[in-house]
């Protein structure tokens, strides 16, 4: 008699657990059924509380949903915009909150020396086109004025030009004369202070 009661209790418990799992999956399905047609793709929807047995499943489901949501946002972007989004994400992860403003709201130009200082832009353009002719790089990825601090704590103004093939150190006081050229495949890392 006791065996039959125990077996009946286990069958009821198993049926209850199955019911909880099915009701959770039906609830998620009902809530997220029309997210594709919603304006925010279901970001405002509150997730139902999963049973204990489905906690890890719910984490994976949220991860799938977040990836799909991001894909829905970026699928209509141009390839240039997608590259910029990827670069901003990589930068955000690399700097890990060291800089309060990364300029995520604005577009990243890349060639800041040409854009930011109109009085020196002509000399920089001449030097960069001469380097392009000589080293045969395709495009400028990044350029800006920097402040170099040597081991004796002496600060000097420099300019950095990064192309698809080389990294150049330039002297802005001497009409952006190239001081050093390093092929990108030789660059492992570069120290950065924000």
Image (tube, helix red, strand yellow):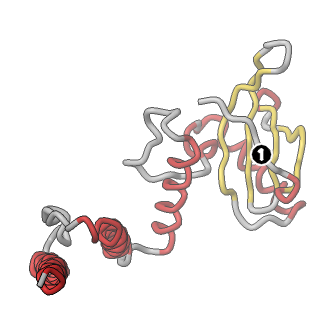
- Name the secondary structure under disc 1: loop
- Rendering coords of residue 147 (x, y %): 70, 26
What residue appears at the point 81 percent right and 50 percent down from the top-left corner?
Answer: 188
Work out whether residue 191 or residue 17 is closer to the camera in this orientation and state it.
17
Residue 168 as seen in the image, left or right of residue 37? right
Q: Is residue 28 visible?
A: no
Work out whether residue 145 or residue 128 is closer to the camera in this orientation and state it.
145
Q: Which residue is mark 1?
A: 189
Assign the N terminus to one quadrant of the image. Answer: bottom left
Q: Is residue 131 above or below residue 38?
A: above
Q: Is residue 96 above or below residue 165?
A: above
Q: Is residue 80 above or below residue 149?
A: below
Is disc 1 surrounded by few (<14), some (14 to 19) or many (20+) residues within 10 Å? few
Q: Is residue 30 visible?
A: yes
Residue 155 as seen in the image, left or right of residue 179? left
Work out whether residue 173 or residue 141 is closer to the camera in this orientation and state it.
141
Residue 53 as seen in the image, left or right of residue 187? left
User: In the rendered picture of this protein, how many numbered marks are placed on residues?
Assistant: 1
What residue appears at the point 52 percent right and 41 percent down from the top-left corner?
Answer: 96
What residue appears at the point 50 percent right and 33 percent down from the top-left corner?
Answer: 99
- Which quarter of the picture shows residue 28? bottom left
Work out whether residue 72 or residue 132 is closer to the camera in this orientation and state it.
72
What residue appears at the point 35 percent right and 77 percent down from the top-left corner?
Answer: 76
- Rendering coords of residue 118 (x, y %): 58, 39
- Rendering coords of residue 176 (x, y %): 79, 37
- Rendering coords of residue 119 (x, y %): 62, 34
Assign the C terminus to one quadrant of the image. Answer: top right
């Amino acid at each position: 008699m006791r065996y039959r009661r125990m077996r009946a209790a286990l069958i009821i418990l198993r049926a209850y657990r199955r019911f909880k799992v099915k009701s959770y999956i039906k609830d998620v399905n009902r809530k997220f059924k029309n997210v594709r047609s919603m304006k925010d793709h279901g970001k405002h929807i509150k997730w139902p509380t999963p049973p204990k047995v489905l906690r890890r499943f719910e984490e994976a489901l949220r991860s799938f949903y977040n990836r799909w949501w991001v894909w829905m946002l970026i699928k209509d972007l141009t390839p240039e915009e997608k590259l910029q989004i990827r670069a901003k994400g990589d930068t955000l992860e690399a700097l890990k909150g060291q800089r309060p403003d990364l300029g995520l709201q604005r577009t990243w130009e890349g060639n800041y020396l040409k854009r930011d200082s109109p009085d020196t832009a002509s000399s920089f353009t001449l030097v960069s086109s001469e380097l392009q002719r000589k080293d045969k790089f395709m495009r400028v990825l990044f350029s800006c004025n920097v402040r170099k601090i040597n081991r004796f704590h002496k600060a000097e103004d420099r300019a950095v030009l990064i192309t698809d093939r080389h990294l150049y150190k330039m002297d802005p006081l001497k009409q952006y004369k190239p001081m050093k050229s390093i092929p990108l495949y030789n660059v492992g890392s570069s120290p950065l202070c924000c």
